[in-house]
Image (spheres, grey):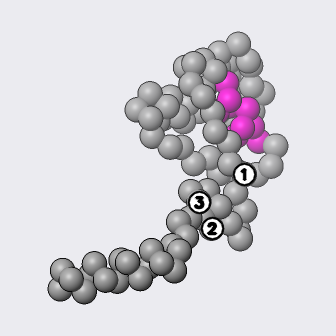
């Protein structure tokens, strides 16, 4: 099966409902998680839909050992800041 999205024609299975869902995610600024084997066109289809919608694309390659910190970052509390927060907690208790 082939499907045309934007200017590109895809020679593999891409359903109209999945493209519609992807476009709805982009229109509403919601994230989309695409899961599939290597080479099936996940990156290509999202890149083309984002380009058609004139939206920026942020691509994150995820593996099994990746944690939230690698995507969102983490906040490290300095020892002095931790002590200050504990004092505030004691004062408000």
Q: Is residue 89 above or below residue 15?
A: below
Q: Inspect the magenta stretch and tell me whether residue 41 lies in it.
A: yes
Q: Who is closer to the viewer here, 48 or 90?
A: 90
Q: Position of residue 57 (x, y in %)?
A: 63, 33
On the rendered image, what quadrant is the C terminus found in? bottom left
**Residue depth check, mark 3 versus mark 1: number of the one nearer the observer:** 3
Asked which quadrant contains residue 41, the reply is top right
Could you tell me which residue is drawn at 65 percent across and 61 percent down? 70
**Label 2 element class:** loop
From the viewer's perspective, tell me whether residue 10 is left or right of residue 55.
right
Q: Position of residue 47 (x, y in %)?
A: 68, 29
Q: Inspect the magenta stretch and tell me whether residue 76 lies in it.
A: no
First reached walking from the N terminus: tag 1 or tag 2: 1
Label 2: few (<14), some (14–19) or many (≥20) C-alpha neighbours in 10 Å: few
Q: Is residue 68 above or below residue 59?
A: below
**Label 1 element class:** loop
From the viewer's perspective, tell me whether residue 92 is left or right of residue 3.
left
Residue where numbered disc 1 is placed? 61
Instruction: Indicate which disc residue 67 carries.
Output: 2
Residue where numbered disc 3 is placed? 73
Could you tell me which residue is drawn at 44 percent across and 27 percent down? 27
**Label 3 element class:** loop
Q: How far apart are the alpha carbons under marks 3 and 1?
A: 15 Å
First reached walking from the N terminus: tag 3 or tag 2: 2
Could you tell me which residue is drawn at 56 percent across and 57 percent down? 72
Q: Is residue 45 visible?
A: yes
**Residue depth check, mark 3 versus mark 2: number of the one nearer the observer:** 3
- Region of the chain picked out in magenta, as a range: 40-48
Q: Position of residue 44 (x, y in %)?
A: 73, 32
Q: Is residue 17 visible?
A: no
């Amino acid at each position: 099966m082939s499907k045309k999205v934007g200017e590109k024609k895809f020679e593999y299975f891409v359903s109209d409902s999945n493209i519609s869902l992807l476009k709805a995610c982009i229109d509403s600024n919601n994230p989309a998680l695409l899961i599939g084997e290597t080479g099936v066109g996940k990156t290509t289809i999202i890149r083309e839909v984002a380009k058609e919608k004139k939206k920026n694309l942020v691509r994150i390659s995820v593996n099994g050992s990746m944690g939230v910190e690698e995507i969102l970052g983490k906040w490290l509390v300095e020892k002095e800041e931790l002590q200050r927060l504990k004092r505030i907690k004691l004062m408000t208790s």
